[in-house]
């Protein structure tokens, strides 16, 4: 049997100050704890899936379109259409949070009790008139049925 490719970086050790976990790795743990252990502790990743060029293109175009309204500090027409009282957030660190500058940086927070650093790349941030920040995750999907904001997350 051929030897599997084994990752050496970002493996869990029993005494870390902090340990970085992305949302997708937390999902992996919930879906398959064994797969999570093999990946994070032993460095044996799941087989990779093909890329999603259409989803990536939609993501890129949405970011560019919302950036236009961010510069104007006006709500995007779809925000107005759905009664979302917010505008795209204008902040100098947004390119870092969206991973436009560095590879795999994004936003993160450390849970002091566990030492886990939950991290991920965000698509956008909107700000309400009250100053509340809303983290936005753009989704592209293919379906014959109507898409609703009330649908369960997939």
Image (tube, rainbow, N blue to C red):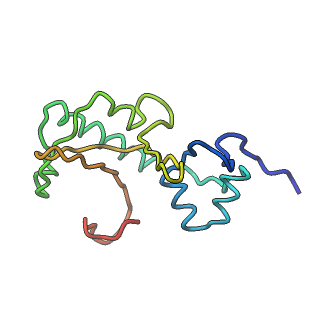
Residue furthest to the front: 113
51 up-or-down from 93: above or below: below
- Within the image, what quadrant is residue 49 found in? bottom right
Q: Residue at x 38, y 60 (%)?
A: 141
**Given the current orientation, which residue lies at the most extreme right position?**
1
Tell me if 75 is positioned left or right of 41 in this view. Answer: left
Residue at 34% x, 51% y: name it: 137
Residue at the spot x=11%, y=55% of the render?
Answer: 81
Residue at 56%, 68% in the rendered image: 31
Q: Nearer the viewer, residue 109 or 78?
A: 109
69 vs 94, left or right, is: left
Q: Residue 26 in the image: x percent, y percent?
A: 52, 58
Residue 95 position, x and y percent, is: 35, 31
Quadrant that contains the N terminus: bottom right
Q: Nearer the viewer, residue 52 or 101?
A: 101
Left or right of residue 110: residue 60: left
Locate the C terminus by quadrant.
bottom left
Quadrant of residue 62 in the image? top left
When asked about the image quadrant of residue 153, the answer is bottom left
- Total marks shown come to 0
| x and y percentages locating residue 57 in the rendered image | 39, 43
Is residue 113 found left or right of 125 in the rendered image? Answer: right
């Amino acid at each position: 049997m051929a030897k599997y490719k084994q990752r050496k970086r970002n493996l869990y050790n029993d005494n870390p100050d902090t340990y970085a976990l992305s949302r997708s790795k937390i999902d992996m743990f919930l879906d398959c704890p064994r797969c999570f252990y093999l990946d994070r502790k032993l460095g044996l990743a799941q087989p990779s899936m093909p890329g999603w060029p259409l989803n990536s293109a939609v993501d890129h175009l949405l970011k560019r379109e919302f950036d236009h309204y961010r510069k104007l500090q006006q709500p995007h027409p779809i925000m107005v259409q759905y009664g979302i009282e917010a505008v795209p957030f204008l902040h100098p660190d947004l390119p870092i949070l969206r991973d436009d500058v560095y590879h795999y940086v994004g936003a993160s927070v450390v849970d002091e009790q566990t030492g886990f650093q939950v991290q991920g790349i965000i698509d956008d941030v909107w700000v309400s008139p009250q100053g509340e920040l809303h983290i936005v995750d753009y989704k592209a999907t293919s379906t014959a049925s109507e898409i609703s904001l009330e649908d369960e997350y997939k």
